[in-house]
Image (cartoon, rainbow, N blue to C red):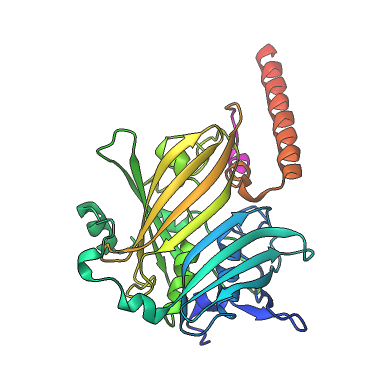
């Protein structure tokens, strides 16, 4: 693959010698800032790339279901592809993502593929329907990512040594109140900065972008402080957070079409919170091309845990804001450390007041 196709090169997998249908990462996965955990979009995308190597060449992904089980370290991941079904028009694959051992599962993917010629025949036009874009969505989809947006310096993924830089940029867009008083739409514009070689690369790009910035949506639309700067804040000043942990449970995406879009030109994501209950919330996302036409829909179930509001410095903000990929042991360790720091601060403040 030519070097100019940086995105596809960065999520490449290679066969494991002596193990049929077993693959491993070519590069160490990206991670969120200050967190030595693989970003969740990496195993999703590389697992899909591994499954593509086991299906006929004219097949494309049309549905993906992901169950996140455990955080993966910022080290090479392994992928075991299990063939469930292959017919002349359809194929299904399970992908088990592991790291330290073949039974140490990080996440499990169920992928459904469809022969391209089947989708191109389609239904008669009078039976076709997709959720139409709003006028605002069409306008925002056509607008390029602002090269001067402060968001371009926000949430940069950590890059392991020897790994290509993440070839994408994103820009958060204002929240829109819908006609339903309980429903708000939060939008983000993405662009893969490197060219993409073909239809399969486009599908992988959409899979990757589907899990870049959706986890925080319940917090954003409900105005819950969790660390990141406010929209439009050029100084990128962090906000205090009430959040202890948040993580994905399940992630499902369905493609409305398999061609006719280009993630290199831009992708508009419209995200809404369908419900919140207890510690869980469900996001629904519509991914659109630069004309506003629907590419795919995504449902993501997340779990959140809050702590009593307390004063935190900038370093603590970063640690809290990216608890996403930490283990339970790390949660407990950092919670104890935070409590001890808070107690110390209180004691010092009391001492100063007596003086």
Relative image position of residue 114 (x, y in whole percent): 45, 74
Q: How many marks?
A: 0
Relative image position of residue 135 (x, y in whole percent): 20, 54
Side of 164 relative to 176 (left or right) = right
Answer whether residue 297 is magenta in the image.
no
Answer whether residue 316 is magenta in the image.
yes
Q: Would you place residue 254 above or below residue 70 in this image? A: below
Relative image position of residue 21 (x, y in whole percent): 68, 78
The residue lying toward the viewer, choosing from 35 and 353, is 35
Look at 68% across and 22% down and name the residue there: 346
Look at 53% across and 87% down and name the residue there: 1
Classify the position of the C terminus by image quarter.
top right
The answer to whether one can see residue 262 in this image is: yes
Q: Would you place residue 128 above or below residue 163 in this image? A: above
Side of 50 relative to 211 (left or right) = right
Q: Which residues are magenta?
A: 310-317
């Amino acid at each position: 693959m030519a070097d100019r196709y940086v995105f596809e090169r960065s999520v490449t997998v290679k066969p494991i010698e002596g193990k049929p249908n077993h693959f491993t990462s070519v590069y160490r996965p990206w991670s969120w800032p200050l967190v030595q955990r693989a970003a969740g979009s990496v195993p999703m995308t590389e697992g899909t790339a591994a499954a593509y190597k086991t299906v006929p060449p004219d097949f494309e992904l049309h549905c993906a279901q992901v169950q996140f089980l455990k955080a993966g370290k910022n080290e090479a991941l392994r992928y075991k592809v299990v063939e469930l079904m292959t017919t002349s028009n359809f194929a299904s694959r399970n992908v088990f993502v592991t790291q330290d051992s073949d039974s140490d599962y990080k996440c499990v993917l169920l992928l459904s593929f469809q022969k391209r010629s089947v989708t191109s025949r389609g239904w008669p036009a009078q039976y076709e329907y997709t959720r139409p874009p709003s006028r605002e969505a069409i306008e925002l989809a056509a607008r390029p990512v602002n090269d001067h947006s402060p968001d371009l310096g926000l949430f940069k993924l950590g890059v392991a040594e020897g790994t290509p830089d993440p070839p994408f940029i994103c820009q958060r867009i204002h929240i829109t109140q819908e006609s339903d008083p309980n429903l708000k739409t939060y939008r983000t514009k993405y662009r893969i900065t490197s060219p993409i070689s073909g239809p399969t690369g486009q599908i992988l790009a959409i899979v990757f972008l589907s899990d870049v910035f959706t986890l925080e949506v319940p917090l954003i639309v409900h105005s819950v402080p969790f660390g990141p700067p406010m929209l439009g804040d050029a100084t990128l000043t962090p906000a205090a957070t009430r959040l202890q942990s948040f993580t994905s449970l399940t992630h499902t995406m369905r493609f409305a079409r398999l061609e006719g879009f280009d993630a290199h030109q831009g992708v508009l994501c419209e995200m809404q919170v369908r419900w919140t209950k207890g510690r869980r919330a469900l996001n629904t996302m519509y991914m659109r091309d630069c004309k506003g036409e629907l590419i795919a829909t995504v449902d993501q179930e997340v779990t959140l845990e809050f702590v009593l509001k307390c004063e935190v410095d900038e370093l603590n903000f970063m640690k809290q804001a990216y608890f996403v990929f930490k283990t339970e042991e790390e949660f407990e360790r950092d919670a104890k450390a935070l409590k001890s720091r808070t107690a110390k601060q209180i004691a010092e403040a009391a001492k100063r007041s007596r003086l």
